[in-house]
Amino acid sequence: MNKAIITVVGQDTVGIIARVCTYLSEHHTNVLDISQTIIDGFFNMMMIVDYSDADVAFETIVEDLEALGEDIGVRIRCQREEIFTKMHRV
Amino acid sequence: MLNIMEVHETNQMIEQEKLDVRTITMGINLMDCARADVDETCEAIYAKITHYAKDLVSTGESIERDFGIPIVNKRITVTPIALVGASCCKTSGDFVKIAHALDRAAKTVGVDLIGGYSALVSKSMTPAEELLIRSLPAALSETDIVCSSVNVGSTKTGIDMNAVEMLGHIIKEIAEATADIDSYGCVKFVAFCNAPDDNPFMAGGFHGVTEGDAVINVGVSGPGVVSRALDAAEGKDFEFLCETIKRTAFKITRVGQLVAQEASKRLGLPFGIIDLSLAPTPAVGDSVGEVLEKMGLTQVGGPGTTAALAMLNDQVKKGGIMASSYVGGLSGAFIPVSEDKNMIDAAESGCLTIEKLEAMTCVCSVGLDMIAIPGDTPASTISGIIADESAIGMVNQKTTAVRIIPVVGKTVGQMANFGGLMGYAPIMPVNTASCEAFVTRGGRIPAPIHSFKN
């Protein structure tokens, strides 16, 4: 399994999760977990996804989601999971 | 499973606290490039570097994208050129040809800097090493991204004072040769004592003769992250302060370890070491000086600075060592004046002096780094400063270095601009009492008694 973390930060608005999930399903990327909270007044959403079967390169997903974020008016990042697990798990 | 707060913390470090990996540095052995003819040697060097490092920059960029962590520099270190060119270089001009070959190769593969135009003369100089040192003014003024270092001493060998004396003059000549750009050539040169073989940072990085054919070393950064973490430690005792630094250093280093392993895997080369250094940049909030001030100093350079730095350096190592499988290089806090906003301010206000910086180098990783001094400083005074730093390194069995810039045409009260990561620095006053009769005696300072451990 190849896991990545997608984070969305910005103003809450209708359809953010829908649009991200639509993109992911179009590219065969499976959502494993979703959580959201408000940090410092900003909407924060985190998705854990499995991109093992994705039909595009990982960096394409990164770029497409970034562009999608710009379109919605939020910041969307997609990073491989290891940067977080390495930092927070011994 | 990861939670949203942990993910937020990591991204906050990257986006707001300037967490980055300072450099992925590929070390390349050039011993097998030595030929009898200098032009053939240059060709072999160019061919080997451009072959081994052809994917270094693109790999670094792809790791950046995958993990969302900036990797500021991609660099190359090579075997000390005084060794590689020893058989074919009959003049200083021959060595300069090799410097051009390095510059060309580095530009072809797109790296930021290439280090290793170096000589290891801790006991004394071979004719080739002397030629390389004499070639420095031309080599560093005619090339753009070649960095050079000379190791003038070690705990085991003592200090080669002939080389120290010569370097005083050479540094002045490099400054003259690059006078039109605030003597920038001196930014690319560092004199070392106890130089490490696996340093990924510049200007002092070279691929030591103890290393394998090629290796990936990584230098981490992150003073901004430590500084932000210390906000939570305000008014708390030393135990809390130390634990905060240690925990933060652990997290920073784990990112470096991840990047190093990934780069090593993708490039098919062994992972060497992580250099656990807090490397500042001139940007606001990315300053080691700020970290020291957050510990409770009004301004870096005042009483308490050395103790605060000693503690910071130690905690960074304690936190970082467990986060990485191999630690090496310089590993500690850097205190380059021109690259650190709070140090620049302190030097400008007169709170931070060269003498205090010298004391600080006894307890942190490097030495007198990126210090601009008046252009009319005598060569013997520069040699004296190098000798002092080397003595600190030699006696304390640690690496020390001098990267000092006698800025031609400028004096105390003026500012030197080096640009980019190299920053800017006020010209600092230098003690003018002469040491000429001392540094010109000739010969070497013997190794200290505690080096005889056999």
Image (spheres, coloured by chain):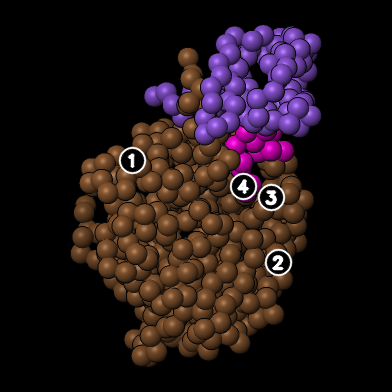
Chain colours: A purple, B brown
Q: Distance between the residues labelled 3 and 1?
A: 35 Å
- Sequence-wise first label, 2 or 3: 3
Q: Nearer the viewer, residue B36 or A17?
A: A17
Same chain for the residues at labels 4 and 1, yes or no?
yes
- Residue named by callout 2: B143
Residue at 21 percent of width and 54 percent of height: B453
* Chain for numbered disc 3: B
Q: How far apart are marks 4 and 2 (CA)?
A: 22 Å
Residue A60, compared with residue B354, is above or below; it is above
- Residue named by callout 4: B72
Q: How crowded is mark 3: few (under 14 residues within 10 Å), some or many (20 or more)?
A: many
**Type of residue at label 2?**
Thr
Whether B296 is among the magenta residues is: no
The numbered dot on residue B244 is 1
* Chain for numbered disc 1: B
Q: How crowded is mark 2: few (under 14 residues within 10 Å), some or many (20 or more)?
A: some
Across and down, in percent, residue B97 comes to 72, 66
Residue B410, compared with residue B64, is above or below; it is below
**Type of residue at label 1?**
Thr
Across and down, in percent, residue B119 comes to 52, 64
- Residue named by callout 3: B111
- Sequence-wise first label, 4 or 1: 4
